[in-house]
Amino acid sequence: MRDDYEKARKLGEKAFQQAVHEGRHPYLPVLDEFLDLKTCSRIHIGVMNIPSNLVIGTKTAGRQNAFACNFMPLLEKETEFGLKWSALYESQVEEGMRDAIVCYEYLHYFYVQEGNKRVSVANYLKMPSIAADITRLVPADLKETDAYAQFLKFFAVCPLYSINFTKGESYKEFAALLGKDLKTPWEETLVRRIDAAFYHFHEAAALSGLEGNESDAFLLYITVYGFDRLRYESTAIIRKNIEALKKELKVQAESENIKVKENPQAKKEAPLIDLRKILPVYSESRPLRISFLYDEKTEESGRAYDHEVGRLYLNKKFGSLVKTQCFEDLTDDEKLRAALEKASASSDMVFTVSPAMMKETLKAAILHPEVKYLNCSVNLSANAVRTYDVRMYEAKFLMGALAAMSTDNHKISYIADYPIFGNIASINAFAIGASLIDPQIKVYLAWSGVHDQDWLKELEYLDINVFAAEDLPSLGNDSTIYGLCRREPDGTIANLAAPVINWTKYYELLVSSVLEATWSQDKEGEEKPINYWWGMSAGVMDLTVSSRLPYSSIKMIQMMQESLIQGTLQPFAHELRAADHLIQKASAGRLRNEDIIRMDWLNENIIGVIPEYTRLSEGGKKLARVSGVKAAKEKG
């Protein structure tokens, strides 16, 4: 038994030296040294098994120096400590651990008050769990949006410490996958099944060398492969599946690491190569097979119709080199999954046209790595799925300037739909463009995607005649309420300008990159997620302006648009101010693409707020859950 103490001590010395080398604290963290218990409320949880790897420190400093940071012993074996450790180890091997340790839980981690040596022995024996009598410490300043606050809701219905997601919303996602919520206690049999399934996953993850948060990996695993399969599959199969997920897990852990492509890849001079190595080679006898998946009907949705025009153009442009098909009216995940299954089996390339379709698209992409998947969205990081969208804020910047030219009372309005990635940038660009023309202008922000808001009546009440509405006209009627509008003296609505997305050009460029074998050049050896975010300079977007506007206004907008294309005019460069704070100084350059996409502040001349999640329509909530900006998620 003494030999085992020496082995454990060597593990402790190794961990100690490694921590010193890396500049980390080499001993156990002490709860009393960094936390004033008076600032926390106490809840006695009772005795239950907890994961050993979550026991990371000690309550007091009494025995701190006896253990390295991995709970392995540091004192000589002939000391009283060494003799007691060896005796406890012998008892554990022969009889098992009889008494529970006493510990405090703070923010999902445990600090031992009684039983440090028991934890040390358990860790040496690689015991996955240990019995503990737990008192929970809840900080007074805990926010509803904190991941730990969501864990407390989860623990109340499913008392497991092994599940420890890094993102608060993951607990809701996990519950939904199992057909549950965070309000009603889960059946005890289900809790035991989850515990067993997670341990089974843990074993396979350890063998596969998985890095990063294990709970996040567990969630992605069951999202793709299902919970029930995990319970019954062998460790070898689970390891194989984990290997397929590693790139996606890395992307999740490095959410800032996105490669935004602002313009199409310039075609490079091809070196002399063996063409047989470029597979597949598409031809009339073996065309590039492409599927388009729409969440709405093309005859009812202007957005879906525009994408469908892009698909039909591909047939005309490339002829027999491509073969396309479409699936529409995919209104729920079940329909989408079925369509993705058919498309994946018969396609080389798949486009899904809504951010709400990203989750199912990613699942299909992981299961079918031989197919190229693209989702029309921004900032939804995935290694297996490339995303694409337009820099709509460029058109909205010009529309804001034109709106300021077209009003005489320093008041205009912007009607947004949902607070999702990219939309806040469009709102702010509109407001900034307006302020360049009229420094006194105020932009009244309204939302069409929230409950109980009649924005047309609000505009009339506020005496606002110029406003930006939805980007596309509704199909099936001749409504002019889209783009930039003005209410005329006789009450009619005139359309002054509207953004135009050239999806035919966008899809032509993307498909050409595959046909010309330049698709892989966008990666350039990197494993970053790719987000195509093209704008006016790529020719995929324009602004149409009504001829009824004064010539001087049209000329000004044309000049501003040309400057945008050349890059000499940037809405988000130099001084930027939100309503209550400075975003950046006048000496600053253009905001990073990532900061523009994830924008969750409103420009200082905007009257309005980002709506709370609970106020959104059901369609808005669905989009916000997937690609909502942080401010909207926090309020929900």
Image (cartoon, helix red, strand yellow):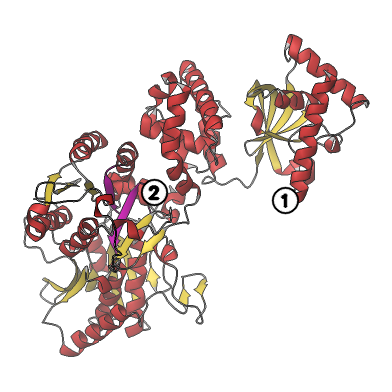
> Which residue of the protein is positioned furthest toward the bottom in this rendering?
552
Hey, what amino acid is under mark 2?
Asn
- Residue in the foreground of this view, choosing between 419 and 446: 419
Residue drawn at 78 percent across, 28 percent down? 8
Which numbered disc flags the more N-terminal residue, 1 or 2?
1
Up the image or down, 401 lies above or below 300; here it is below
Where is residue 455 shown, x and y percent of the image?
A: 25, 61
Residue 387 is covered by the magenta coloring: yes
Up the image or down, 139 lies above or below 569; here it is above
> Which of the 4 image quarters holds residue 61?
top right
- Residue in the foreground of this view, choosing between 538 and 541: 538
Q: How many marks?
A: 2
- Residue 112 - label: none
Residue 448 is covered by the magenta coloring: no
Tag 1's secondary structure?
A: helix
Residue, disc 2: 383
Badge 2: few (under 14), some or many (20 or more) residues near its Cα, within 10 Å?
A: many
Residue, disc 1: 22
